[in-house]
Amino acid sequence: MVKIKNICCIGAGYVGGPTMAVLALKCPDIRVVVVDANAARIDAWNQDDLTQLPVYEPGLAEVVAEARGRNLFFSKDVDQGIREADMVFISVNTPTKTYGEGKGMAADLKWVELCARQIAAVATTSKIVVEKSTLPVRTAQAIKDILHNSQSKISFQVLSNPEFLAEGTAIQDLLRPDRVLIGGDQSPEGKVAIQALASIYAAWVPEEKILTTNLWSSELSKLTANAFLAQRVSSINSISELCEATGADVDDVAKAIGMDSRIGSKFLKASVGFGGSCFKKDILNLVYICRSYQLHEVADYWEQVIRINDHQTERFAKQIIKSLYNTVNGKKIAFLGWAFKKDTNDTRESAAIYVADYLLDECAHVVVYDPKVPKEKIYADLDFLGTRSSEENRKLVEVVDSAYAACADAAAVAILTEWDEFVVLDWNQIYSTMKQPATLFDGRNILNGEQLEKIGFRFQGIGKAAL
Ligand code: UDX
Ligand code: ADP
């Protein structure tokens, strides 16, 4: 059996960082080097102040504190990292293409391809190359082609080992995964590589939870898992609108259906819309792949999951406008939360960005508070949309450092992220500092509407009786 002693992970992001930290923690005999082309990101991983790591995840700082400098290293020298490793994880970003063929749908594999070329160029010994990033089915073929066409005579095995962690619970998900999936060639050499990776996970994951498949099943399973999860959120969100129209309560409906063991209770929380780096990107990617195989009905089916999500986010923004007498021009609207879910500082595809953009188009004055997202990130997210100039975004949007400051003098408060600290705010105090009538939109259904109405708020939850 091949025993791996040196691992290199290319990409020190939300997946690469936590994943390798836990691997290093659990396998003290393996040297793990995480490299990144972004030098500032590596510096941030190496700094002494563990509260300032580039990724915020509960429990991550503790894991980094134990493993960093022992067998976990963060380095800017990508070539050296690759050269010294027996196994190289590719954990770089694969955003949706913003140009050319497949624009707005297909995954941009530029960075993955660059990694493969760099591995081919600098490797002097044989390596197992592991796809950690979520990739379109059959990407491993492209990586294989690049590696095998390199000048060198050394051999490469390509594995797919998609990461199923969810942000905000990454450390728990990594320590106790539902399953670990490893796809590889079914040749004798491929099977040896699969076993080498499986034996690493076996240090802390029960054997029956380590699944091995061929490359294509593994790649497609990751896209499919995300599509199914997102579909559940869109399904309950679609029902939330019907609840508002009929007087049903979406939380009651979710509880009632979730107790059916065939349906299950998880992932049925109605919300302002799902965000995150994966769901939208992966479904668009799935839709694009289906269309490229001429499977238009299948593509239409999955595309609808995204349409419902866009609709849900827009619907939320429209409700705010409608309840403020159809104009928000010059009105202060407090946003509690900007991250795409609680317990992360990640804002990619967060519903908050789109709700803000919609309200800014109506000339609202948006004031944001998020416990973990820095001010510059909020402005960068809005600037990235390109709807208005950077100066205008800075003029119309204010970022403050407390929920109370955000809500003072506001005509309405909108909860965009379900941070625990919002549940325990002094809502009596907030009410007394707001413009009247004070309206509260709970985009995450974390607050008790009845109690808030008793204080005097006009309250609107998702899938609750309409205002
Ligand atoms: C997701 C998958 O869960 C994970 O397995 C995969 O590896 C990456 O994509 P992530 O995007 O980090 O993880 O978070 P997740 O917990 O899935 O939440 C995604 C979005 O859906 C968030 O915006 C969340 O608020 C929303 N959501 C989730 C709901 O609105 N309701 C729910 O019931 C669950
Ligand atoms: P994810 O959520 O998938 O981890 P991120 O965007 O957080 O995605 O992280 C991906 C990281 O990969 C970024 O820090 C980026 O700088 C890095 N990266 C992308 N391409 C390369 C490359 N060719 N070489 C080294 N690092 C790269």
Image (cartoon, rainbow, N blue to C red):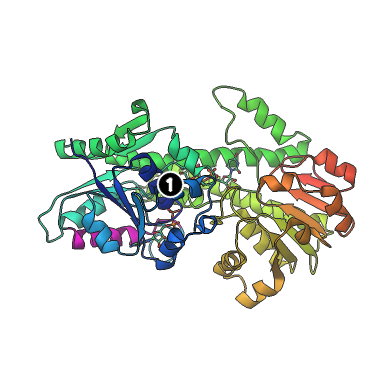
What residue appears at the point 74 percent right and 34 percent down from the top-left corner?
249
Look at label 1 and name its amino acid. Answer: Glu
Q: Is residue 152 above or below residue 444?
A: below
Quadrant of picture, ligand 2: bottom left
- Judge whether residue 333 is colored magenta: no
Q: Which image quarter holds the N terminus?
A: top left
What residue appears at the point 15 percent right and 58 percent down from the top-left corner?
124
- Judge whether residue 107 is colored magenta: yes
**Tag 1's secondary structure?**
helix
What stretch of residues is rendered in magenta?
105-123
- In the image, residue 460 lies at what x, y percent? 78, 46
Which sits in the foreground, 90 or 58?
A: 58
Which sits in the foreground, 75 or 179?
A: 75
Q: Is residue 210 visible?
A: yes
The quarter of the picture where residue 401 lies is bottom right
Tag 1 residue: 66
- Dot 1 crowding, Cα within 10 Å, few <14, some 14–19, many 20+: some
Indicate left or right for 207 with 128 as reference: right
